[in-house]
Image: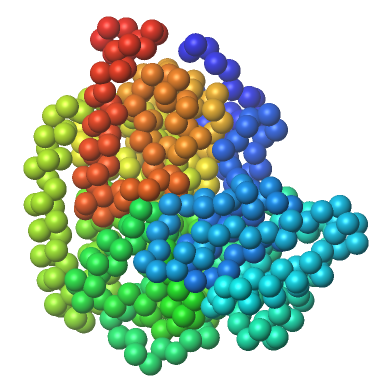
Amino acid sequence: MTTIPILDERRRQIFQEQDNASFAMTCDRHSVAGSVSQRACVFCGSRVVLYPIADALHLIHGPIGCAAYTWDIRGALSSGPQLHRMSFSTDLQEMQVIFGGEKKLYGALCELIAAYRPNAAFVYSTCIVGIIGDDVAAVCRQVAKEQGIAVLPVHSEGFKGTKKDGYRAACDALFKLVGTGDTRDIAPVSINILGEFNIGGEAWLIRKYYEQMGVQVVSVMTGDSRVEELRRAHGAALNVVQCSGAMTFLAETMQAKYGIPYIRASYFGIEDMAKALYDVAAHFAAEPCIQQKAEVLVREQVAAVLPELQRIKADLAGKRAAIYVGGAFKAFSLIKALRLLGMQVVLAGSQTGNADDYATLREMCDPGTVIVDDANPLELSKYVIEKQADLFIGGVKERPIAYKLGIGFCDHNHERKIPLAGFEGMLQLAREIHTTVTSPVWGFVPFRAKDGEF
């Protein structure tokens, strides 16, 4: 099983210490044919970014399969409206493919707006729409004028690129909302949280931390967000970007037009969560009470979770972990979190990392760690076996790989329903890792030796 081959075209997207004299990785390229890449299409990328806007209508202009594929795609919770969880489609058929689907799109928008009274509507273009040439933007302008709400086209034809291009299409649509709302009641010490999607309620934890510090959160883009919050986001003093692949473009656009600076942050793990709070406090250094409140908050939160983390570490010390996630920034935090638990990372990869991300991963990882870009199931299986991993952290597509290989698994993707961010989330992550890695069921895996090795 350890002789699983990899495609020659993929070799420059995989780094192994013993095979390379110097570090060099190829990334930001289309998936190689035959590799069964985990990457999704442009449409999916835009959908996952915009989906958590809870009081907006989301209409997919295309065949019904596109809507089914992305239905309820994130575990993004809402404190109020649930409209985002509805999956609407124009369900284009043969007649529309031949003669055009603009009339059907217009009818669907008018019917849905009348039925649900959303505060805005997003219309997603899919592959077939790009091929037949429907003028989606023109239909959106007409409906917006007639209905009196923002109707925003999302140019997300799937064949145009990769999931990362979908992120940019989503940011383009979001930016059309920003700058249209009232900012008069926004405090000087205020932020927007970008790239936080409220998976399992994580945005609520993060917002609570910042508010305890005395920082006003104007909007979260896009977890549990409302259209009105997004309209006035240009009034915030600082943008804090977590998911860099999804939201850096929007942060840069807002900086160029509105002069709002941005910083990068991660909310996973104790170290990075604390840093995210301290970095915001440092930005508002003119208000020293913000820093003082941040220090008290971090001290109290760490004291609350550290004793149990130490007990868990006693069982996990020396165990080996493989990480394959969507964004590389999340991988950085997971490496630190796993080290806090005494675990060694033997495989680290992402779907959407860039050259700088992988250079950072190389610096963070121990010698011998395999680094992969846009991996496929065979590659992941190969290195999990060769590196004798005890744990796989990934998404639902990686769960079968872990279980078939007889190792523990932790879901850290956007489909999950439990929060893993923040200080409480770190404890939840540690508990989940401990439960799966120490499960006695792995002792019954036929091809593992008595000592737990492959």
Nearest the viewer among 20 and 231 is: 231
User: Is residue 81 in sight in this rendering?
Assistant: yes
Q: Quadrant of the C terminus?
A: top left
Quarter of the view holding residue 312: top left
35 is higher (above) or lower (below) than 236 = above
Quarter of the view holding residue 235: bottom left
Give the number of marks: 0
Indicate the position of residue 107 as horizontal and vertical percent values.
75, 71
Give the residue at the far right of this rendering: 99
Quarter of the view holding residue 234: bottom left
Name the residue: 21% across, 45% down: 427
Indicate the position of residue 226 as horizontal and vertical percent values.
45, 73
User: Is residue 21 in sight in this rendering?
Assistant: no
Name the residue: 63% across, 86% down: 148
312 is higher (above) or lower (below) than 319 = below
Nearest the viewer among 440 and 131 is: 440
Indicate the position of residue 190 as horizontal and vertical percent values.
32, 79
Name the residue: 85% across, 59% down: 96
The color scheme shown is rainbow
